[in-house]
Image: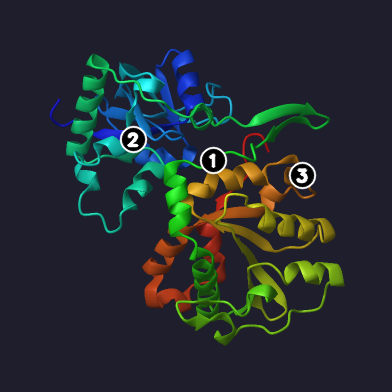
Amino acid sequence: MSDRNYWLDLFTGKTWEEFLQSRATITGFRKRKHNLAKKIQTGDYFICYLTGISRFVGVLEVKSKCYIDTKPIWEDQVFPVRFDVELIYKLEAATSIPVKSLMDKLPMFQNLKSPHAWTGFFRGSPNKFNKRDGEIIVKEIQSAISNPVELEFDEKKYWRKPRTFESSVGVVTVPDDTDEETEEERIVLKSEKSTHEEIQWILLDLGKKLGLDVWVARNDRNKSHDGMRFQDIKGLRVELPRQFDDATNRTIELIDVLWLQEDAIVAAFEVEHTSAIYSGLLRMSDLISMQPNLKINLYIVAPDDRRDKVFNELNRPTFARLKPPLPTICKFIPYSELKLKINEMGDMVKYIKPEFIDEIAESCVTDES
C-alpha cells in the first residue's frame, strides 16, 4: 500500500500485556489526541514502542477510523480514542529492537539540532513517522521475527507498574520511590537542569507584559536566567498583600511565581521539572487547607513528559480529598504549550487578557478523581 502512513504507538510493558490479553484488536489514546487521531486512515501502521525499555515490539494495521469508547481495557487509564487493529508483527520483550540499535539506519537520527533531540518524538503518541523511518523499522521488526536475538532487559522498567493497596478511602496507588526513569526521561532531565529558572523568567516576563505585578518565590529572588536577575524585573513586588494570616502568607511567599492585579492574586504557578513533583503540590495543598474559600487560579508548569507524573501525584488521596479537591482547581501547563503560545502572541501580548493562560492549561481531573 504505497500511500500508507506510519504512526508511533507507545506502551509500557503493563499496557502492552493488557493489550495482548484483550485479544490485541483495539488500541487507544488519550482524549486530547482525538483531532490528531482523525488523520489516521484504515491501512496505516502503528509501530509499537515500549517506553520502559526503549524498544520496538510490534506492528499493528489500522482497521477502522478512530472512535470514542470508554469500555475498560487498560487498568490504569481509559485511553478513549480508539482504533480497531490487527497485530501483524509481534516480538517478545527479550527480542524486541532497541531504538539506539537503529540510529545509523533511520533518517530521523540524522542532522539533529542536539544529540538528544530524537527523544522528543517518543514522549507521546500517536506521532507520525517519516515514511522512510517507518518502512525501515517495519523491515527490522520482520527481520527480528525471522532471526530473533535475545537481549536482557530490566523487568522493573518493563512493567512500570505502581503498587496499590486497600485503605479506608479505597484503592490507593503508591508510586515506587526507587523507580528509574526511562533513558528518554533521564536525558530530558539532564538537559533541563536550568529550565526551572528559565520557565520562572518566562512567567515573570509574561505577567509583566500583560500589565500585571509579579512575585517570585522569596528564596529565589537572587536567582537569574541568561544573565538577567529576577530582582531586576520591572513590576516585581517587594511585599505581598497582607490580607491573610502569617501561616498563609509564609506559604504564598514560597510559590514560584505569582501574578497580581493591585491586591488580588490573579494566578499562582509552581514550576516542577524534577521527578518527585512534591514540593509545589504541598504548597498548593497547604494553601487550600488554610484558605478553602480562596479564589486563585493554580497551575503546575512542567515538562511535557512529566504530565503523567503531575496527574498521578495530584490525584493522590491526600490532594484529591481536600475541600475543594486540588485536581479540580489546579491545572497543568506543559512547557511546550507555554512557549508556543508566547511565540504566537509576539508583540500582541500587551493586548491579551491574563485569562488566556487558562486556555492552554489542562484540567487534572481524572476518571478516578
Looking at the rendered image, the disc whose residue lies closer to the viewer, 1 or 2, is 1
Looking at the rendered image, the disc whose residue lies closer to the viewer, 3 or 1, is 1
Q: Does dot 3 land on a helix, a strand or a loop? A: helix
Which quadrant, please, contains the N terminus? Answer: top left
Q: In terms of image quadrants, where is residue 126?
A: top left
Q: Between marks 3 and 1, how big is the CA–CA gap? A: 24 Å
Q: Which residue is drawn at 45% across and 23% down?
A: 16
Q: Earlier in the sequence, mark 3 or mark 1?
A: 1
Q: Which mark is residue 180?
A: 1
Q: Between marks 3 and 2, how big is the CA–CA gap? A: 35 Å
Q: Earlier in the sequence, mark 3 or mark 2?
A: 2
Q: Which mark is residue 343?
A: none
The reply to whether the C-beta atoms of the residues labelled 3 and 1 are less than 8 Å apart is no
Please tell me which residue lies in front, 340 or 15.
15
Decide: few, some or many residues near mark 3? Use Cα within 10 Å; few <14, some 14-19, many ≥20. Answer: few
Q: Where is residue 312 in the image (x, y as percent from the top left)?
A: 62, 41
State the residue lying farthest toward the left.
2
Which quadrant, please, contains the C terminus? Answer: top right
Q: Is residue 120 visible?
A: yes
Q: Position of residue 237 (x, y in %)?
A: 66, 83
* Amino acid type indicated by mark 1: Glu
Please tell me which residue lies in front, 258 or 295.
258
Q: For mark 2, what is the residue?
A: 8
